[in-house]
């Protein structure tokens, strides 16, 4: 019952309208999503504050699992300069898998579940992982091809 209520709240929050395809250079479509620790992550809250590293993933995706230490390290070592959010697409991946996955992989970074895949569809996520860098002004700077060590790139995303 608790999971059902959580999923309904998340669906209501995610009600993003479908629009034109997103690409590098576009303003990132805003969204609101509840994280697994029950806080609300709103993309536009970071504009003017810090860039966002947005990753769409699934627990069953071997590449995603392999990249988890990279995402965790980015959050741990660069979280002051860069907001990190992992969004599970919900594609054949029940919500109940998230917390055990995070515990098993010793993850303490912000995670959310895309009930109804609303945000994943808006960002045209076809495969996982699909990652975006959204600069401090809310523009998409990268879609995938993000190096594991991004320390030297962060300054260009805060301009």
Image (tube, rainbow, N blue to C red):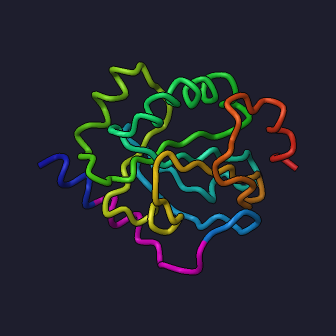
Residue 144, above or below 44: above
Depth order, front residue of 70/100:
70
Whole-percent x, y for residue 87 in the image: 45, 47
Depth order, front residue of 95/21:
21
Q: Quadrant of residue 45?
A: bottom right
Asked whether, in this view, residue 4 is left or right of residue 10, the answer is: left
Q: In this picture, which residue range is highlighted in magenta?
A: 9-21
Give the residue drawn at x 58%, y 27%. 70
Whole-percent x, y for residue 1 in the image: 11, 49
Give the residue drawn at x 68%, y 45%. 145
**Magenta-colored stretch includes residue 14:** yes
Give the residue drawn at x 46%, y 63%. 119
Residue 6, above or below 86: below
Give the residue drawn at x 51%, y 65%. 124
Residue sticking out furthest to the left: 1
> How many dots with numbers?
0
**Magenta-colored stretch includes residue 120:** no
Q: Quadrant of residue 146?
A: top right
Residue 87, above or below 150: below
Whole-percent x, y for residue 59 in the image: 35, 38
Asked whether, in this view, residue 46 is left or right of residue 128, the answer is: right
Residue 15, above or below 134: below
Depth order, front residue of 5/86:
86
Whole-percent x, y for residue 53 in the image: 63, 44
């Amino acid at each position: 019952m608790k999971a059902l209520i959580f999923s309904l709240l998340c669906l209501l929050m995610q009600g993003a309208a479908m629009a034109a395809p997103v690409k590098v250079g576009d303003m990132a479509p805003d969204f609101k999503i509840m994280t697994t620790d029950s806080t609300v992550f709103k993309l536009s809250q970071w504009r003017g504050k810090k860039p966002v590293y947005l990753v769409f993933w699934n627990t069953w995706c071997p590449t995603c699992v392999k990249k988890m230490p990279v995402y965790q390290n980015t959050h741990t070592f660069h979280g002051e300069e860069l907001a990190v959010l992992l969004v599970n697409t919900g594609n054949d991946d029940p919500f109940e898998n998230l917390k055990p996955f995070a515990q098993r992989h010793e993850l303490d970074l912000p995670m959310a579940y895309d009930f109804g895949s609303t945000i994943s569809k808006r960002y045209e996520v076809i495969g996982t992982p699909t990652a975006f860098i959204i600069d401090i002004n809310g523009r998409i700077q990268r879609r995938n091809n993000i190096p594991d060590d991004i320390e030297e790139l962060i300054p260009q995303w805060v301009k």
